[in-house]
């Protein structure tokens, strides 16, 4: 079984092999995703929404991200584990960026980090890479900039906006990132960027022409309710099965059907007789 590294992810583009990446946040689901053959697992800051119930990704911090990254790493043998650097873990200073990126590898046992942003983040990204940490870039809809964008909107729909994203992609490649996530942009732009870069692109809401695709596991298997983005394809309806199981459990407990003796432990007859004799003697 070949361990996937950041170098292998780069090589997959050259060989024409599509990259499969999923975002998940705990040991058990990471273990399943890894065993299913995913090439990379992103411990996304989207855990703020999916796991912690926040309205956006801005509320999650380093300690929470490290906690979940360690859990994921514990379940993974083959896939590349990528830790998502949370809001304000790298924006304030280069020193913060290097320190926190290093913590993902040292404490979270990740093998790379993901950093949002283009030209404004280049120096920090270069510094992180120079410190020995592989970096995955992220362009288009970058959720940590949601308030600047005025909401979760498709990016790069005009010529000038598309040109800026393309320029940022080239700058990230020159800075040394090993791949770039392209989120929520027209497929034509994502296709152009993919063709212009030697490093792979991984799309989410960016059409079919990227070098790979990423989805949040919970969206893919139907654990996030009925409201999902347009770009999500559901491959299962796990939420419905879970609700059926919970309702059945409730009915069985209320009616006394659960637990039955089949789900109960039994004392050996001789020990039971001793127990009864002991109670009688006390009386």
Image (cartoon, grey):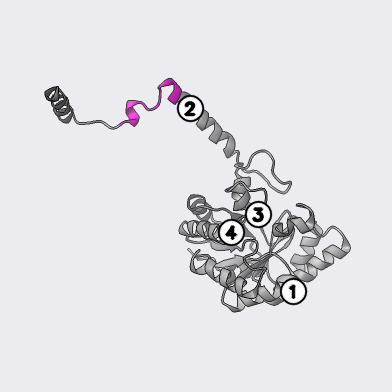
Image-based side of 211 in relation to 265, left or right: right
- Residue at horizontal 55%, vertical 59%? 65
The residue segment tinted magenta is 253-264
2 vs 4, front mark:
4
Q: Quadrant of the C terminus?
A: top left
Spatial separation of the CA atoms under disc 4 and disc 1: 27 Å
Q: Counting residues from the N terminus, which is met first, the one under dot 2 or under dot 3? A: 3
Tag 4 residue: 61
Spatial separation of the CA atoms under disc 1 and disc 2: 56 Å
Q: Nearer the viewer, residue 265 or 194?
A: 265
- Residue at horizontal 79%, vertical 57%? 149
Q: Please, what secondary structure does the residue beneath circle 3 have?
A: loop
Tag 2 residue: 250
Q: Is residue 106 magenta?
A: no
Tag 3 residue: 57
Q: Is residue 255 magenta?
A: yes
Q: Counting residues from the N terminus, which is met first, the one under dot 4 or under dot 1? A: 4
Spatial separation of the CA atoms under disc 2 and disc 4: 36 Å
Q: Position of residue 59 (x, y in %)?
A: 63, 54
Tag 1 residue: 171
- Residue at horizontal 14%, vertical 28%? 274
Density class for disc 2 (Cα within 10 Å; few <14, some 14-19, many ≥20) is few
């Amino acid at each position: 079984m070949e361990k996937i590294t950041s170098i292998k992810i780069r090589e997959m583009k050259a060989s024409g092999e599509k990259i499969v990446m999923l975002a998940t946040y705990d040991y058990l689901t990471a273990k399943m995703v890894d065993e299913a053959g995913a090439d990379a697992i992103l411990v996304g800051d989207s855990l703020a929404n999916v796991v912690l119930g926040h309205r956006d990704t801005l509320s999650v911090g380093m300690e929470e991200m490290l906690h979940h990254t360690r859990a994921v790493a514990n379940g993974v043998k083959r896939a590349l584990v990528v830790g998502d650097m949370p809001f304000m873990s790298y924006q304030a200073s280069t020193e913060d960026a290097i320190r926190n990126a290093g913590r993902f590898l040292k404490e979270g046992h990740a093998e790379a980090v993901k950093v949002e942003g283009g030209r404004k983040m280049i120096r920090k990204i270069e510094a992180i890479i120079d410190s020995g940490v592989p970096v995955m870039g992220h362009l288009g809809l970058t959720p940590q900039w949601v308030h600047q964008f005025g909401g979760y909107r498709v990016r790069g729909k005009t010529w000038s906006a598309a040109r800026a994203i393309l320029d940022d992609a080239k700058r990230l490649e020159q800075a040394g990132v090993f791949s770039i996530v392209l989120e929520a942009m027209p497929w034509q732009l994502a296709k152009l960027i993919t063709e212009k870069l030697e490093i792979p692109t991984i799309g989410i809401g960016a059409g079919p022409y990227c070098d790979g695709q990423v989805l949040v596991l919970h969206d893919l298997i139907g654990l996030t309710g009925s409201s999902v983005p347009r770009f999500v394809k559901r491959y299962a309806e796990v939420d419905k099965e879970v609700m059926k199981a919970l309702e059945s459990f409730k009915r069985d407990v209320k009616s006394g059907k659960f637990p039955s003796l089949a789900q109960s432990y039994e004392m050996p007859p001789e020990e039971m007789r001793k127990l009864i004799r002991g109670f009688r003697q006390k009386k």
